[in-house]
Amino acid sequence: MTFRKKYKFESGGNTQLDVLEEVKDIASKEIRLPLSPKTPLRLSNSDDLFEMNYELLDVLNDQIKNLIYTEPGERLCFPNFYTSLKNVISRNDNLNSAIDNIANQIKNVITAYAPGIILNDVSAEYSEVYQKKYNIPVALVTVNYSFFEQVALYNNKPSAIGSFNDTIKRNASLQIKIGLNN
């Protein structure tokens, strides 16, 4: 006499709807991955070694600041990767031409070295408030720009599991103070 083994399939796996619910739960949780270290580099108090940028906007603002504050000769392999803003007053007779020079230099360096940034407007103006505060002429520079960000959109239909990407255009503005040495 042979004995047959009996199997129960009650916990034999997940249905397609169960898997879809798990995917929705995972997709709904915000996962923050670091994109780049903040500059200037600073040690972090969290699990990361350095303080990190988690948003694309913060990364782009850091990149624009680095482009603007790079001095001639700092990047050895890129001789045109700079703005020479430090002594802009000494090269110009008056403050208005210095302000125009600043805006033009910033436009040129962003256009040449930041292809992912669509430059809408760069404006610079003399700030009396900051001159009184710092005792040197200060230009207040506003950089208005756009960029494209890829976002994940999740499909909520039970018959289709997964995600697809979409690209959206975002606008941003960055304001920087530049001290003008005599």
Image (spheres, rainbow, N blue to C red):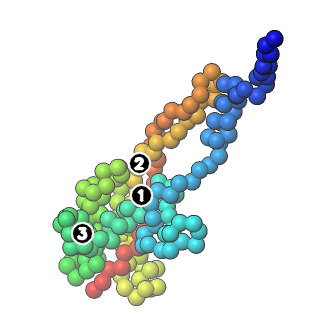
Instruction: Check whether the beta carbons of the residues at disc 2 and disc 1 lie within 8 A of each other.
Output: yes
Which quarter of the image is occupied by the N terminus? Answer: top right
34 relative to 75, above or below? above
- Tell me the residue that label 2 is attached to: 147
When asked about the image quadrant of residue 66, the answer is bottom left
Around disc 1, counting alpha carbons within 10 Å, would you say few (fewer than 14), some (14 to 19), or many (20 or more)?
some
Determine if residue 101 is in view: no
Question: First in sequence: mark 2 or mark 1?
Answer: 1
Foreground pick, 46 / 142:
46
Q: Which residue is drawn at 41% across and 64% down?
A: 62
Nearer the N terminus, badge 3 or badge 2? 3
Disc 3 target residue: 75
Asked if residue 142 is positioned above or below residue 28 in the image, the reply reads below
| The quarter of the displayed image where residue 80 is located | bottom left
User: What's under tag 2, amino acid-wise?
Assistant: Phe
The answer to whether 149 appears left or right of 163 in the picture is: left
Using the numbered discs, state the Cα–Cα distance from disc 2 to disc 1 in whole angstroms. 9 Å
Q: Which mark, by number, is residue 159?
A: none
The residue nearer to you, when weighing 161 against 180, is: 161
**Does residue 64 appear in this view?**
yes
